[in-house]
Amino acid sequence: MYRVYIKYTSSFHLLFILIFLWLTRIPQCVSPYLFLDGDEAILGLMAKHFIEYGELSLYFWGQQYGFSAIETSCIALFYWIRGIDAWSVKFAMLSLWSIGIVFFYLTIEDWLKERKIVALLIILLFICAPFWGIWSMKARGGYVTAFVLLSIILYILRDPTKHLRSFQIGLLSFFCVLCFHAQPLFLIGILPLLLFVFSRKSNLMGSLIFLGTAIGFQLLLITYQSQQPNFWMPGTFSLNAFSFRRLLDLPNFLYVAATSHYFYSMIIHPDFATRWVGIGLVSLIPIVCGFAIFTVIRKKDVLVLILLMAICFTIGYLFFLSEWAHRYILPLWIWLFILTARMMGIWRLHKRITIIIILLLLVIFLLPSVYGLRHYRSNWMPIVHSEEKDIQSVINILLSRNVSHVFCLDPLLQWQLMFYSNENLICRYISSTDRRMSYVQNVNNIHTSDINKTAVVGYNVGPDYRLDISRQEQINKYYFILHPTKEELKIMGFEF
């Protein structure tokens, strides 16, 4: 049986880390901008269907990728504990992310040996840093799962020269396949380490066990995948995507990613402290990599070379992605911090000076940036009270007027309306196909049988002069039209 050994000192540190982690997320939890985006609402609905109907989808609705079963189950557990709401979704994700932090810390602690206080402070820096500040609580179908799995994989491989037992190898293979299906980009950085571990002649049997387990589990998941709808399949790797322009844009791209102030392709301006933390983190990349090269030359440490390659691989794949999304670089910060910790263990810098420097970074920059995340928002429209109260206002009005089915003019709003109304409103978007066709068909059928139960809802960006303005009612940042005819819906672009 594979055991995780935790000593008394480690237990105390882990308890402190978990308390500290949850305390640093309080500013986000009490923010008026705390609001599930469309994709988070989908995962919230998936968990609701699991706990109410026993329907567990392994993958994100409408996709053959984005392994979500772990996140869905975790959210369902919090639903059972405290009810269905946005906080349950956020707390579930933070609990799951906390598991990854535990293994991440145990790996660093093992490398720093008796310098456990330094390992503790490095993890506190990682927790406070803004790059995972938003994503540690974001249910987005695979990213938090991939972080947890990568942390466990790194813990298993913390000593790559150590011989692994058959059970450990099988477990490692299982986690690697799951990580690939959750978010394959997280696995690219681990490839040099896996290659080093299983390329030795003495580990031929281990290689066969790893490959056999991986192939068997992969075939099972592929069989399941082939039976799932494939509504959403964006472009991934492409050699044609490479451009020297991306090389010039890389520093700014990394800066935005470091601040975590982005929403899909929309960039959000962070506060003063978060800006400086972002600049500092981007500046740290060439410094750490340069020192890593020096360490490899002087100390001949293979693991430092492997971790350096992980950073290069992670930055390198950016140039071949069809979509240049900031969230795709989330694994970089894991490799950057773990490489820094490894080199601290090798060079044995003066302990007191190291502690003072890390504490100063925590107090001066990182803690203020955590508070700055309170102002992060995933919507550009102004709010009246809070994001949740504003959407609840339009939901209450629609329900009071006996509306049960809604045509949405925004592809993400439809999922938010369904989640925050507890599916008392069933919604569809403009297109005639969607992630879950039963919703589209349901809205269409009700519109045909009883038009008085339907409405159109969108963001209030001004009156739609193609339609009767007197029928367009506004509330907060939303507007709606009751009982739309099929001709009106077609004018607005709805497909049937």
Image (cartoon, helix red, strand yellow):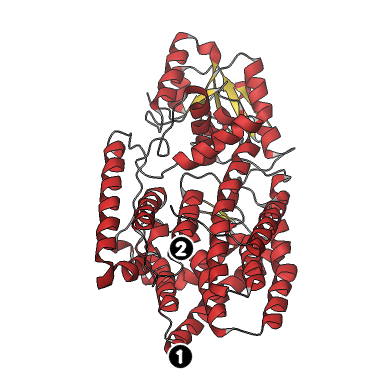
Q: Is residue 412 visible?
A: no
Q: Is residue 418 above or below residue 326?
A: above
Horizontal and vertical percent for residue 458? Answer: 56, 32
Q: CA distance from mark 2 to mark 1?
A: 25 Å
Q: In what element is the residue under mark 2? A: helix
Q: Quadrant of the C terminus?
A: top left
Mark 2 lies on residue: 154
Say whether residue 375 is left or right of residue 71: right
Q: In what element is the residue under mark 1? A: helix
Horizontal and vertical percent for residue 321? Answer: 36, 59
Q: Is residue 25 visible?
A: yes
Residue occupying the point 42% across, 89% down: 297
Residue occupying the point 44% across, 24% down: 439
Q: Amino acid at mark 2?
A: Leu
Quarter of image, res 494: top left
Q: Is residue 4 above or below residue 284?
A: above
Residue occupying the point 63% across, 75% down: 115
Residue occupying the point 43% across, 85% down: 296
Say whether residue 145 is left or right of residue 350: left
Label 1 neighbour load within 10 Å: few <14, some 14-19, many 20+? few
Q: State the residue in front, 467 or 194.
A: 194
Horizontal and vertical percent for residue 241? Answer: 33, 62
Q: Amino acid at mark 1?
A: Arg
Q: State the residue in front, 378 or 119.
A: 119
Horizontal and vertical percent for residue 15? Answer: 68, 56
Mark 1 lies on residue: 298
Direction bottom: furthest residue: 298
